Image: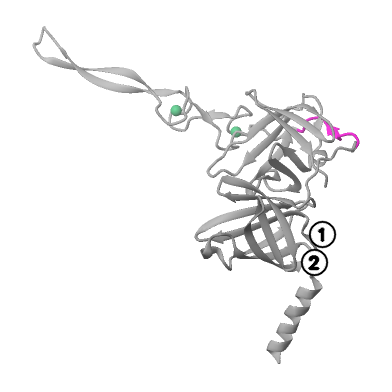
Amino acid sequence: MRTFILLLCCFLSSWLYAQTQQSLIGQWEASASEFGAFYTYNWMIKNNWQCMVRTTAGNRYTDKTYTWEYTAPFITLKTENKTVFKGEVKWQGKDQFTLVVIDDGNPEHKGLKRNYFRQKEQTLARDNGGQMPTQMSAPGSTCYACYGTGKADCSSCAGAGGYYDRVSYQRYNATTGYYDTEYRDEWRHCTTMGCQGGKVECAACNRRSSQGSGAYAPVPTPEGLAGRWRSGATIYHFQAQTGAEGRYLTLQEGNYKQYGLWVIEDGFLKIRLFLGGNSPWKKYRFVSFDFNNLRLSENGGYAQLLLQRLKE
Ligand SMILES: [Zn+2]
Ligand SMILES: [Zn+2]
């Protein structure tokens, strides 16, 4: 009886979500572990019977274009009128389906399941969203170790850049006919890694180096900047939530995500990605900005970063 109800439920749910060709149109993504490798499938199904599949493994990907046909529950992909893929679509909802591989040319793949989720379209916010709210640059509290310079005294030479080494040497004394021991102080440069003339990159603030100075042009308020922005293929999500060290940041490129922090202070947008260890803060100047566009230049470098706001 229980089995029967379960079967009935399965039947009902598949019937409830019996979808038409129109339901497949859109952008889909599946992640699957297959034969020990992790794959991401991005599948763009267009209404002109064309579709594009991007298969990503690690940081490599391949793009393939097909024509598609769907006769529930089967989907067929063709290139040059030759069927290259046949699968069964099991709808789990209008924005989710399981694709069961029936035949993709490799007998080992038969029965593989990939769970596809509908991806929301990420379009740029083109309409005038109004003025970007600004403020005078908020000063941070001065770093006790580097006083805002990002460079602290090296702990092994205490900022001296080296030390004197007392060296003894023997000098022949012609009067006595013996050798006298004499001493000489020789300068040794500090060989500690990262020490340059006694200065090392500040680990106390990971080079965030707050300067406590607000004498800069207006910068966006954190609330104004918060949201999702695109730069090339990378999506920057400046989250409003604040942690102990700053606000949370997510960088996403395809299926690859990085996490970090962001803060606006001393006239800079400061970004720190969690790359392991004491990863340093990077500082960017605001070259220009409005509500939808942001042009940043890396402090001390020439690289520019162009960001465009995405529609929420
Ligand atoms: Zn510091
Ligand atoms: Zn040193």
Residue at x-position 68% and y-position 40%? 233
Q: Quadrant where the N terminus lies?
A: bottom right
Q: Which mark is residue 22?
A: 1
Residue 296 in the image: state x and y as whole percent. 72, 29
Q: Is residue 48 above or below residue 283?
A: below
Question: How far apart are the alpha carbons under marks 1 and 2?
Answer: 8 Å
Q: Amino acid at mark 2?
A: Gln
Q: Is residue 245 magenta-colored?
A: no
Q: Is residue 131 magenta-colored?
A: yes
Residue 155 in the image: state x and y as whole percent. 47, 33
Q: Write down the quadrant of residue 41 in the picture.
A: bottom right
Secondary structure of the residue carrying numbered label 1: helix
Q: Main secondary structure of the magenta part?
A: loop
Residue at x-position 68% and y-position 60%? 76
Q: Amino acid at mark 1?
A: Gln
| Residue at the far top in the pictured view | 175
Residue 279 appears left or right of 138: left
Which residue was labeled with disc 2?
A: 19
- What's drawn in magenta, residue-wise? 130-138
Which of the two residues, 306 or 147, is positioned nearer the viewer here? Answer: 306
Quarter containing ligand 2? top left
Contact, mark 1 vs mark 2 (Cβ under 8 Å) = yes
